[in-house]
Image (spheres, rainbow, N blue to C red):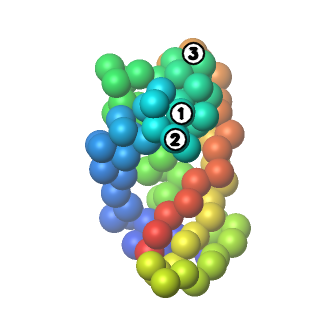
Amino acid sequence: MQLPNGASALVPTEKLLGYLLSETHPVGRFKSRIFTAAGFTEHNINDLLEGLLSIARTQEVKKEVLTIHGRKSVLDGEVPTPTGESLRLRTVWMT
C-alpha cells in the first residue's frame, strides 16, 4: 500500500533544520550525526528534502499505527547523499 496522499507529502524546513540537522535537539542530535556524516548541511537541505519526499511518493507502507494524533505510517527507502552514497532510512509520516 502506498502512503495516503504521498504525492502531497510535506516536510517543513523547521523540521529539517531544527530536528534532523540540529546538533542540539534532545532527540534530533543523534539523527543529525548520521545526516552530517553523509554530507547533508543547511546548504544542501533541498537534497535531503527531495530524498525524503521521494520515499513518501514511491515506497510501500511497512507498518501503520493509529494514534491520538492520527495515523502513523512507516516507510523504508534510500536517499542519495552529497558524499555519493545512498543512505537507507526508515521514515515516519503522519496522515
Classify residue 22 by image quadrant: top left
Kindly report the distance in space between the C-alpha atoms of the residues bearing marks 3 and 1.
20 Å
Classify residue 13 by image quadrant: top left
Amino acid type, residue under disc 3 in the picture: Thr
Say above or below: 74 vs 14. below
Q: What residue does disc 1 label?
A: 29
The x and y percentages for residue 43 are 32, 20
Q: Quadrant of the N terminus?
A: bottom right
Residue 44 locus on image (x, y percent): 36, 24
Bin the neighbour count of mark 1 within 10 Å (Cα to Cα): few under 14, some 14-19, many 20 and up.
some
Q: Which circle's residue, 3 or 1, is located before the other in the chain?
A: 1
Q: Nearer the viewer, residue 81 or 24?
A: 24
Whether residue 68 is visible, yes or no, is yes
Please state if 5 lies on the left or on the right of 87 as rendered: left
- Ranked by sequence position, the earlier of labels 3 and 2 is 2
Q: Which mark is residue 39?
A: none
Left or right: where 76 falls relative to 11: right
| Distance in Å between CA atoms under marks 1 and 2 | 6 Å
Q: Amino acid at mark 1?
A: Arg
Task: Report the Cα–Cα distance between label 3 and label 2.
Answer: 26 Å
The residue carrying mark 3 is 83
Element type at mark 1: helix
> Which quadrant of the view contains residue 31?
top right
Q: Could you tell me if the residues under marks 1 and 2 are in contact, i.e. CB atoms within 8 Å? A: yes
Q: Is residue 21 above or below residue 4?
A: above
Question: Crowdedness of circle 3 by 10 Å Cα count: few (<14), some, many (20+)?
Answer: few
Q: Which is closer to the viewer, label 1 or label 2?
A: 2
Percent position of residue 88, x then y: 68, 40
Q: Tell me the residue that label 2 is attached to.
A: 26
